[in-house]
Image (spheres, rainbow, N blue to C red):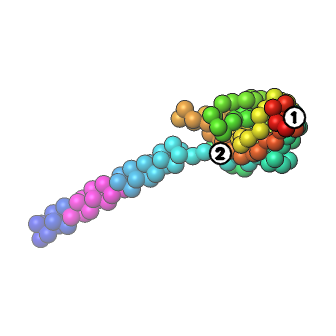
Amino acid sequence: MLSTSRLITFLLVLLCVSTKAQDHKLDSVATNLNNYGLSTAHSNLFVHFDKNVYTNNDQVWFTAYLLKTVTDIKQYHTLYLSLVHNRDSSVVYQGKFLMDKGFCYGALNLPDSLPEGAYRFVVNTNITLNGKCDAEFIQTITIKSTTLSPLVD
């Protein structure tokens, strides 16, 4: 009778230890999933431009919206906008604009010296995560020239 009660006690202790070990494994999996989610999280940024074909010396109007953020929205205060030539990835314009409560709107004048061709607007915010921009938006555009070349008949 005494050995049966010891056997039952031993089995109950073994069951408790086994359950605790499984809880630790589940906690470890949950922690790893949470850490992975934090390391790959990023905000969603959308920028609406007034058109996608411009002429040199044209005015560009835009509105930017932060759709989802990974941190407090009050920390997003600057929107960086760059115009990049697709031919050689040279940056031909850079500007900073004030963000407020996840919104930003503004305008810029394209230089009249821009050659026609394929360009892209690259837009991001002031927040960086793991050394990379938290939110980025890219819009391809075409620039047509309004100046006539003196070498063309």
Q: Which residue is mark 2?
A: 43
Task: Give me the residue at 85% from left, 47% from top.
Answer: 50
**Left or right: 78, with 86 as reference point:** right
Magenta highlight on residue 21: yes
Pick the front one: 149 or 99: 149
Q: Which residues are magenta?
A: 11-23
Q: Is residue 29 above or below residue 72?
A: below
Q: Nearer the viewer, residue 45 or 84?
A: 84
Q: Please tell me which residue is depicted at 69% across the width and 44% down the height of the picture.
A: 138
Mark 2 or 1 closer to N-term? 2
- Mark 1 burial class by Cα count in 10 Å: few <14, some 14-19, many 20+: few
Mark drawn on residue 147: 1
Q: Is residue 54 above or below residue 98?
A: below
Q: Picture coordinates of residue 89 (x, y %)? A: 63, 34
Residue 145, quarter of the rendered image: top right
User: For the residue marked with disc 1, what is the amino acid?
Assistant: Thr
110 over 4 or under it: above or below: above
Position of residue 42 in the picture relative to residue 96 (left or right): left
